[in-house]
Image: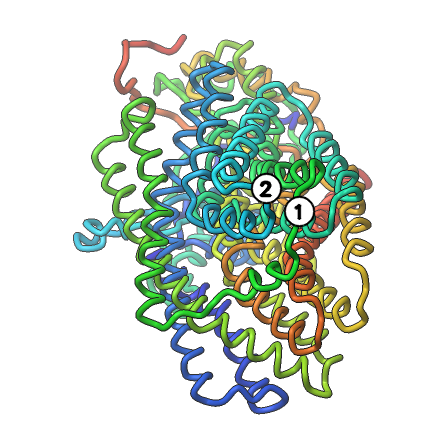
Amino acid sequence: MSNILPVDGKLLLSIVRGGLGEDLVKNLKENGSSGSTIVLARGVIENPLLHALSLDDAEKEIVFTLVSDNQLKDLLETLSGYKAHKRHSCGLSMVIDIHSILRHDTHVESKDFKDERSNTMDSPHTLITCIVNKGLADEVMDAARKAGATGGTIVGARGTGKEEDVKFFGIQLVPEKEMLLILVGSGLTGIVLETISKLPCLAQPGSGIAYCTDVERFMVLGGKKTTLKK
Amino acid sequence: MDLLRKLRETSMSVLPIVAIVIILNVTIAPIGWKAIGNFSLGAVAIIIGLALFLQGIDISIISTGHLIGAKLMEKRNLPLLVGAGFFIGMFVTVADPQVNVFAQQVSSLASGIAKTPLIWAFGIGVGFFAALSFARVVLKVSFRWLIIIFYSLMVITSLFVDPFFLGVAFDAGGATTGPLSVPLIIALGVGVSSVRKSSSSEEDSFGLVGIMAVGPIAAILVMGLIGGNVDTTAAAAVANEEILSLGGLFVHTIIEAFWALLPLLILFLIFQFTLLFQQKRQSIRMVEGLIYVAIGLILFLVGVNGAFMPVGSAIGSLIGSSDYRTLLIPIGFFFGGVIVLAEPAVWVLTDQVNEVSGGAVKKSLILIFFSLGISVAVALAMVRIIFDLSLFQILIPGYIIAMVLSFFSPPLFTAIAYDSGTVASGPMSTSFLLAFTLGVSTSGGGDPFLDGFGVIALIVMTPMISLQLLGLIYRYQSSKKKKGVLVK
């Protein structure tokens, strides 16, 4: 995880019916994506009767896929034609701008973080998302905190990377991942990313990726007013 | 909608049982089409009941249990955590109707053991081990060593105890953890671990049920050591419970479900006003969930006790007295593997494992190994009855293998494995599989008491091994994967 891709990318965020995550990822992979991360979630059905009966739960899966700009067109076409088991409604999908993708499998010389970000400093905050192997999120958070981040949120997830596909009696064993969300002031993004990229536990290929999303506004809900360090 | 998905899942697990029984009906165990009709009706009740029950558990017991566990941990107060663990463990045990019936049976068999002190002994035993396992998580004591210490003590003690007490002890482990308390305890464990910042929080989520089951077993074994006179002729009678009429069964089941739910409701109310302070929507979900649990449990138990139990018994005695006795081994293998999939707590446990691992440990994989474990257990029970083998020659090596495996299997799987034994011996296996075994035993002139508890004891033991084997496969596969990446 030693390289920062200077190119920006897109995050393809899909929310699908429970159990369809792997199927969607398979489709995306066949069309060029390198792998995704899946998070379990709970949806709420829009039906007053079921709501009154507390039966409005629906299992969902959120699929995070990083794509480069030139892959995007193909993948969007795949998604628009996507149907699972002949059903029409499987979920929804959205495209989000991201930058400063940190991953291992690309061979780009490391650049100066601050310079790179200075031209797009139009948003005051950045959401850094790190997807790492199970058990490493706390390690990453500690490093980020040393670099000035205040706190983070860890979500349990599972990965689907290409080289990690392991079949056992026809059932896929998937690697466990943790997704760490850290909100920082934009001025800190570079130094936090740099600190994370130097962690020895992330030196192995396939141990994790990170990317940034610009955050236009953020607010603290309840409690006393706090601001992030700029 | 989740309820529809659950209905599909429960149908997939119950319909194969119906298919097997129909195939047996036209081949070697003709129980008659009228019985098949009854059985099918019972199967429908079980499918609907189980789906409703699991849905209700999801939105009430599981979510509230998670919250209680997490809030207790957030208080950062070890005496409170340990005290609450003790209280919850004791309360759900003492108030459990199943425990009451069980204690009644034991005291009627062994003179010198009174019912009320026995119930409290169970309660204190379960409470003690619940407190111990909460303390373990905070004090970072390895689950493996705790299990090895207590299970070794159990195995050693069992060598000096009258077989009757041993039988009762292993039954006690199952009887004191009912279909409602097991989900609650699993949820508590997951909740306590969910707020911990540690790489071991996942494996610490499980194992609570496995440790708590030691409580009642220890209570009985200690009583057995101290001594008490046993009337073994009455022991056999206990195993054969009377079968009620359908109307009587319904009333009986409704009362049973009510008494099983009441302590949980009281417990939730106490925590609601001292610790949780859940918001309106959450409270509504909890109450409605408990209503689904009640309806589901009633349908499920009526189906199990009214339809599955008599059929299990009939098939067992028909084949047991026929010329095809050796066929009991493969039939037991099939029954075991299929029946366990209709066990409510099995679904709860696999759901929770899936959730805690973020979906990485697939439900289907765990269910397959659960099935395999119980298949082997019932097949072994049949082998034992046919060839008249000693139960302890199978059980004790089994437990030793389970303990040795804990050194090689990833800790998450070890924790799940020790839970799985208690989880698998729920209402479905203790009725259908027990009735089947008793049918075989009585028709072949065996000792129904020993054979009966033998099958339960085996059901508790084998998944401990099979799920740890699954863990070994995970470890082997992931180490192979790492090597591959390094070479690359």
The chain containing the residue under callout 2 comes to: B
Image quadrant containing the N terminus of chain B: bottom left
Q: Amino acid at mark 1?
A: Asn
Q: Earlier in the sequence, mark 2 or mark 1?
A: 2
Q: Which of B34/B413 is in front?
A: B34
Residue A88 locus on image (x, y percent): 34, 65
Q: Is residue A64 visible?
A: no
- Given contact means CB atoms under 8 Å apart, are the residues at marks 2 and 1 in contact? yes
| Residue on which the image places disc 2 | B112
Scheme of image coloration: rainbow
Residue A42 locus on image (x, y percent): 37, 45
Residue at 78% x, 43% y: name it: B405
Q: Amino acid at mark 2?
A: Gly
Question: To which quarter of the image does residue B237 belong?
Answer: bottom right
Q: Which of B473/B185 is in front?
A: B185
Image quadrant containing the C terminus of chain B: top right
Q: Circle 1 — which element? A: strand
| Residue on which the image places disc 1 | B229
Look at the picture and state if B18 lies above or below A17.
Answer: below
Residue B303 locus on image (x, y percent): 41, 68
Q: Is residue B157 visible?
A: yes
Q: Which of B381/B290 is in front?
A: B381
Look at the picture and state if B404 lies above or below B77.
Answer: below
